[in-house]
């Protein structure tokens, strides 16, 4: 199964994605996480990308598109869940082109919708576990609050992403996400139109509910 996942930063997309990955044995391909791995490993690509990421800007398409498409090829042979890409219409077109070229089926496109003010509050509250990026911890969300300041899943040390603590950078990321002309919502609309033409299935979920309720709705829609 191949799934494309949309949702603003803070919508719980990473958490839902981790659950889906486990349930369907998919490769969870997150463009932001690939960049963070490169930055952590000190690669040239990581150094170039960090400048943009710290400002909340998109990393240029010349760097991002080949990196993501390569990862899809190398890790996604048994099904993928793509998260964080595409974020603009150029990336959307390129992805669709590649999907068609590879004769792949895009089974589902999932969009988690969330008002911008709630998304921002959640971002400022989220914490990363040093042992696993996918352990959900957020000081603003009751269901996934850290326990005694440590990861609620494994007790690991928590930190905040530097780009999450900068309110201006968060606003910039949301400007890109909520841009229906050329940003991420425009990319989502591109796939919604494809769904209307019968090329894929489009599932829209309200991200304001609790994690389990959203997961239940998502699983019911995927049956
Ligand atoms: P995320 O973890 O999805 O919030 O991504 C963190 C940062 O990585 C973003 O703010 C961008 O700077 C960069 N990034 C991730 N995905 C993309 C993409 N598809 N296109 C350009 N930049 C991206």
Image (cartoon, rainbow, N blue to C red):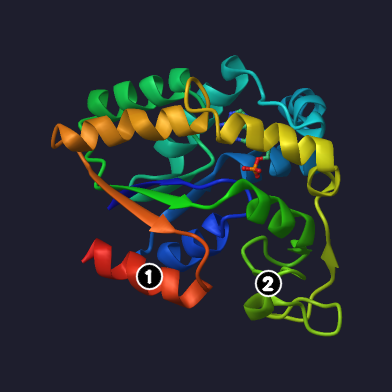
Is 46 on the left or on the right of 115, as rendered?
right
Q: Is mark 1 within 8 Å of ligand 1?
A: no
Q: Position of residue 171 (x, y in %)?
A: 73, 37
User: Is label 1 in a helix, a strand or a loop?
Assistant: helix
Q: Is residue 78 in view?
A: no
Task: Using the image as rendered, state which of residue 193 and residue 17 is in the foreground.
Answer: 193
Residue drawn at x 55%, y 35% as measured from the top left: 178
Residue annotated with mark 1: 23
Residue drawn at x 85%, y 84% as measured from the top left: 148
- The residue most toward the bottom is 148
Numbered badge on residue 210:
none
Residue annotated with mark 2: 141
Quadrant position of residue 118: bottom right
Is 169 on the left or on the right of 59, as rendered?
right
Q: Position of residue 114 (x, y in %)?
A: 53, 52
Q: Position of residue 184 (x, y in %)?
A: 50, 32
Is 120 on the left or on the right of 87, as rendered?
right
Residue drawn at x 67%, y 50% as measured from the top left: 117
- Density class for disc 2 (Cα within 10 Å; few <14, some 14-19, many ≥20) is some
The Cα–Cα distance between marks 1 and 2, rounded to whole angstroms, is 23 Å
Quarter holding the C terminus is bottom left
Q: Quadrant of ligand 1?
A: top right
**Dots 1 and 2: beta carbons under 8 Å?**
no
């Amino acid at each position: 199964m191949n799934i494309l996942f949309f949702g603003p930063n803070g919508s719980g997309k990473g958490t839902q994605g981790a659950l889906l990955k486990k349930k369907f044995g998919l490769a969870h391909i997150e463009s932001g996480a690939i960049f963070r791995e490169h930055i952590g490993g000190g690669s040239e690509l990581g150094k170039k990308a960090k400048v943009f990421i710290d400002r909340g800007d998109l990393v240029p398409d010349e760097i991002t598109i080949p990196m993501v498409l390569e990862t899809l090829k190398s890790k996604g042979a048994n099904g993928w869940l793509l998260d964080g890409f595409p974020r603009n219409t150029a990336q959307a077109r390129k992805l669709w082109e590649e999907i068609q070229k590879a004769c792949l089926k895009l089974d589902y496109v999932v969009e988690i919708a969330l008002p911008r003010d709630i998304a921002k509050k959640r971002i400022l509250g989220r914490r990363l576990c040093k042992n696993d990026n996918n352990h959900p911890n957020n000081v603003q969300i009751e269901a996934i609050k850290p326990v005694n300041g440590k990861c609620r899943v494994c007790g690991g040390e928590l930190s905040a992403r530097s780009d999450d603590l900068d309110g201006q950078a968060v606003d910039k990321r949301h400007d890109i996400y909520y841009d229906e002309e050329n940003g991420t919502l425009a990319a989502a609309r591109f796939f919604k139109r494809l769904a209307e033409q019968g090329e894929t299935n489009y599932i829209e979920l309200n991200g304001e509910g609790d994690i389990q309720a959203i997961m239940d709705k998502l699983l019911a829609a995927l049956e």
